[in-house]
Amino acid sequence: MDPTDHYPPSRLPPLPTPVQHRAGTRWRLSAASGLHKGDRPYQQDQLRVIAHPRVQGCVLAVIADGMGGKSGGRKAADQVMLTAQQLFERYHPDSDDPHALLQQIVQESHSMIRLTALSTEQEPHSTIVCALFHADEGRCYWSHVGDSRLYIFRNGRLLLRTTDDSYVQTLVDKGEITEAKARNHPMSNVLTCSLGMSELPSKPVEESSLMPGDVLMLCSDGVWHYFTDQDLEIATSKLQPRECCQYLIDKARTRAGGRGDNLSLIVIELARLPAPGETSSASSGA
């Protein structure tokens, strides 16, 4: 058995120690992840949460959902992870452009998957969703291709969500079907764009300011397919990252009824730490 077939939701290695926001806010990032092969014979999802090796408060989170047979999809997802880690380790948060980093991760992952296809006579593809956190700026930057998603929740409500590159999303955009019907549409797994396709359209990197208490979730379609936005609002607001990952994986497995896809998700919670000399009661009331 592949040892990565089932990772129980877990705390990740310690993320950055508290950092000072330029405007005075001190941050703590708490993260957990879950990876499960679901009811598939092979695990083709992969994920990473990487703390920058030299700069505290800079973190990269990545999920890839590989496609392409027994080994092709896994190779594609592994290539995304390798490319993201190598480029992030060379990234200089104080001087380099975060937009350029994420664009490079997407483009180089795409190119490497295309080369793999030529050398192995397979047709590997992958989705990607990657989020870059600059805690010293209080900002998040992200890019995605395919139907792996980033969600940002604030005060228990959905603030934003990426838009899928899928056939059913085009129907939703045209007003032909609702979001609820899209989840159960027979062509819900048909993508209009993925890494490894003959041509990869240029997509802009997006960004948003963050606030203490915000919760970010990255996940593959094996997770979000079984939940409404309201379900996720409740889970991310009521549960800590580790418990949230465990709950969502267990619930998705149950709702899949033995027909579930690979599952992968990362949950990151941003907390405000009291300033030096600030009392704990003042902190809890802020």
Image (cartoon, helix red, strand yellow):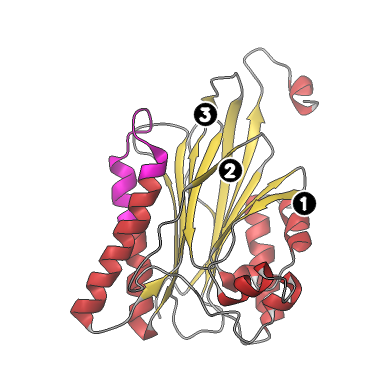
Residue 154 magenta: no
Q: Nearer the viewer, residue 73 or 104?
A: 104
Evaluate if marks 3 and 2 touch, with contact meaning CB atoms under 8 Å apart: no
Dot placed on the residue nearer the N-terminal end, 3 or 2:
2
Q: Nearer the viewer, residue 257 or 8?
A: 257
Identity, as a three-letter code, of the amino acid under mark 1: Lys
> From the viewer's perspective, is the residue at label 1 or at label 3 nearer?
3
Q: Which mark is residue 137?
A: 3
**Local secondary structure at mark 2:** strand
**Local secondary structure at mark 1:** helix
Where residue 254 sits in the image (x, y, percent)? 70, 79
**Mark 1 — residue?**
238
Where residue 3 sits in the image (x, y, percent)? 41, 72
Dot placed on the residue nearer the N-terminal end, 2 or 1:
2
Identity, as a three-letter code, of the amino acid under mark 3: Glu
| Snapshot quadrant of residue 269 | top right
For the residues labelled 2 and 1, the Cα–Cα distance comes to: 15 Å
Magenta stretch, main secondary structure, is: helix
**Quadrant of the image for the C terminus?**
top right
Would you place residue 204 above or below residue 51 in this image?
below
Q: Which residues are magenta?
A: 82-100
For the residues labelled 1 and 3, the Cα–Cα distance comes to: 27 Å
Where residue 195 sits in the image (x, y, percent)? 38, 68
**Local secondary structure at mark 3:** loop
**Mark 2 — residue?**
30
Residue 86 magenta: yes
